[in-house]
Amino acid sequence: STSSNILRQRLQRIQETEPQQHAFTQVMLSEDTISSETRRLSEHDNLALAGVPVAVKDNFCVQGWPTTASSQMLRSFVPSYTATVVRRLQNQGAVIVGKTNMDEFGMGNTTSTSSVFPATVWNEKSPGGSSGGSAVAVANGSCVVAVGSDTGGSVRQPAAICGVVGFKPSYGAFSRYGLIAYASSLDCPGLFGRTVDDVSLVSDYLFGVDPMDSTTLDVVDSANVDADSCDLKGLRVGIPQQFLISELSVNVRAIWERTAKRLEEHGAQLVDIQLPSVPMSLHAYYVIATAEASSNLSRYSGIFFGHHDHDLVRTRTTGFGSEVRRRILSGTYVLSKDAYTKYFEPALKMRQVISSDFDNALLHCDFLLCPVIPKLSMPSTYENATEGYAEDVFTVPASLSGNPAISVPVFADKVGMQLVGRKLHDRRLLRHAASVE
Ligand code: GLN
């Protein structure tokens, strides 16, 4: 059948690319799964995503398949349930080709911090991260769309580096049920695709409240936002002035300016926007994210499931890599009595201010246009950890505020530019993104 041929081609593509690129922690396609999936599809008509090959980041549970979050700690964990986003894709006929590589527990931006799997490679360099495996799987043709997770940029940043589209919806727009928690108030499932249209089409099956995740929300714009909202004429495009920072490289700045100019030539109006609190974002993010991580990761005691090594201390020392341990330590510190009032509470307050800065800004424009990455190529290892954290400067603001944001490849070099839209107006953001790509 056609779908089994398409799946066989993808399997072949994976076999060709995997030895160099290591995008997967586990390939699920095989002659066996191809025949069982084709049989399943033949029993249903009219499934919207029938036979569409999808890759899934290895921090989403798929029943009966190991789910490791690229950590030694979960090396032998086989979940008995499936994440809502994965289930919804399967219900529409999508076929999971495999689980993709990531930074351990999503902590990082290089896809090289796994304590179990080799680093993912793209053009002989790091693909970015933490969802680098999903970005590469789309970029190299192993699948059509891929699921990732974005806590502080982990979908947008690797998309920007690998030349594909990466969408982080509004917080709560895609269900977190079955996603291995990193920082729950920031974690968003997200999607990679070759085009904005592919991502929009699939998003429509993921939007909608999930009874299994009480933080889910319905997006507020309807499926048929007026067809010509794609037209740039009359749109107001916000240029956030606080993103013009010294860390921004000349190249990326030039691409940002060319993109803005092109939108203007197509009839959009450029508006200077102030987001005064944005310079505090990185500080607030790395306090809140580590605090929540230290709490979420306390469940890995070696007692109930996963890795066990002699005692609690040994279990956590041998089960977690060094970056994860660093985050647990800083998170535990910021939640300790004195540091709580000194760091954690101010970070939460700052987050509120950042969020209302975005709300105010988006009263004056239709979407914000800004970079995703500060420079075109990034090292795969850092001398000290905070240098790596600084790469997230353009992505963490929309994570803290919960606004939808998307990285769209522009011009011949396909560098990602970021669009940020109003909260829960995700479909409108996707429409606008289609006119920018
Ligand atoms: N690089 C950021 C971090 O390490 C973001 C990662 C993510 O979005 N999962 O926290």
Image (cartoon, rainbow, N blue to C red):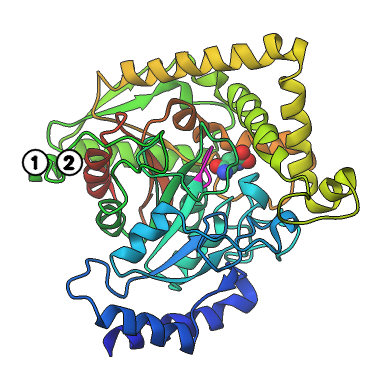
Answer left or right for 186 relative to 213: right
Which secondary structure lies at badge 2? loop
**Magenta includes 89?**
no
Q: Quadrant of ligand 1?
A: top right
Which secondary structure lies at badge 1? loop
- Give the magenta part as a residue range: 150-155
> Which residue does the image show at 47% across and 50% down from the upper left?
160
Q: Nearer the viewer, residue 408 or 330?
A: 330
Q: Nearer the viewer, residue 263 or 179?
A: 179
Label 2 beta carbon within 8 A of ligand 1: no
Q: CA distance from mark 1 to mark 2?
A: 19 Å
Residue 221 place in picture, x, y as percent: 19, 36
Q: Which mark is residue 226?
A: 1
Answer left or right for 429 relative to 163: left
Asked if one can make out residue 165 in the rendered structure from this viewpoint, the answer is no
Q: Amino acid at mark 1?
A: Asp
> Which residue does the image show at 54% across and 48% down from the upper left?
376
Residue 210 place in picture, x, y as percent: 35, 43
Residue 367 place in picture, x, y as percent: 28, 31
> Which residue does the image show at 51% across and 39% down from the upper left?
187
Q: Nearer the viewer, residue 436 or 292?
A: 292
Q: Amino acid at mark 2?
A: His
Residue on which the image places disc 2 = 266
Q: Main secondary structure of the magenta part?
A: loop
Asked if one can make out residue 183 in the rendered structure from this viewpoint, the answer is yes
- In the displayed structure, would residue 356 be above or below residue 96? above
Badge 1 crowding class, 10 Å Cα cut-off, few under 14, some 14 to 19, many 20 or more, is few
Answer left or right for 71 relative to 355: right
